[in-house]
Image (cartoon, helix red, strand yellow):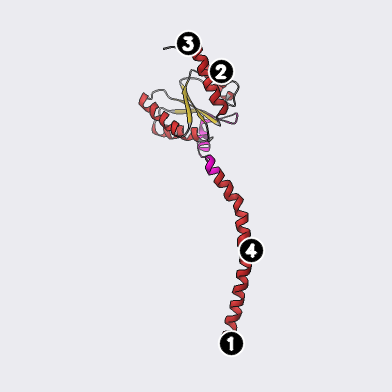
Amino acid sequence: MALTLEGKKAVVAEVSEVAKGALSAVAAEYSGLSVGQLTQLRVMAREENVYLRVIKNTLARRALEDTDFACMSERLTGPLILAFSQDDPGAAARVTKDFAKQYDKFQVTMLSVGGQLLEPSEIDKLAKLPTRDQAISLLMSVMLAPAEKLVRTLNEVPGKLVRTVAAIRDQKQQAA
């Protein structure tokens, strides 16, 4: 069933709103996949808080116009599915990369992060980006390292004094 003009406007508004709040986007060709396989992809995406949408390219161009992902507009050709990462920049890349490993007919065609269009070969870099929690954990470990080193250094002074006194005591006991 074809979309009415109002339906098309609603789809464009929805995708545009999602794209404005998204951190990254991935476009992939899905032709040749069954409905069950696409449902599996949607389940994987939902678990990672990734918004997936099959949308006509003309509507996608309009939806992406005033977003960071406008750079993708020129290369929107063929049957594509768009995936937008909501919370974590690497989520959409991880989902699509994992799904593409299972199904050869699913091909990532482009990536976009921060207004820059990336080549599909760079999906590994995007997929390896840490999640928010992992990034906070890394930052905290970097911030704690100098404090831990200071504590160890300060603790070493009395430890060295105790070892020196013990060595002198052992020396005197052996001499006596």
Of mark 4 and mark 2, the one earlier in the sequence is 2
Q: Residues within 10 Å of mark 2 (few under 14, many from 20)?
A: some
Asked if residue 165 can be seen in this view, the reply is: yes
Q: Disc 4 vs disc 2: which is toward the camera?
A: 4
Which residue position is annotated with label 4?
A: 154
Q: Residue tagged by mark 1? A: 175
Residue 55's disc number: none
Q: CA distance from mark 4 to mark 1?
A: 33 Å
Foreground pick, 161 / 128: 161
| Residue placed under numbered mark 3 in the picture | 4
Q: Secondary structure at mark 4?
A: helix
Report, in whole angstroms, how far the alpha carbon at label 4 lies from the one at label 3: 73 Å
Quadrant in which residue 169 is drawn: bottom right
Residue kind at label 1, given as amino acid type: Ala
| Residue depicted at x 39% and y 27% | 39
CB within 8 Å, label 3 to label 1: no
**Do residues under tags 1 and 2 come within 8 Å of each other at their CB atoms?**
no
Q: Secondary structure at mark 3?
A: loop
x, y percent for residue 154 = 64, 63
Marks 1 and 2 sit apart, C-alpha to C-alpha, by 92 Å
Q: Quickly name the residue at label 2.
A: 62
Magenta segment boundaries in residue numbering: 111-135
Query: x, y (%) of residue 8?
Result: 50, 14
* 36 with respect to 82 (left or right): left
Q: Mark 4–mark 2 contact, CB under 8 Å?
A: no
Task: Nearest to the eye among marks 3 and 2: give it.
Answer: 3
Q: Is residue 85 left or right of residue 105?
A: right
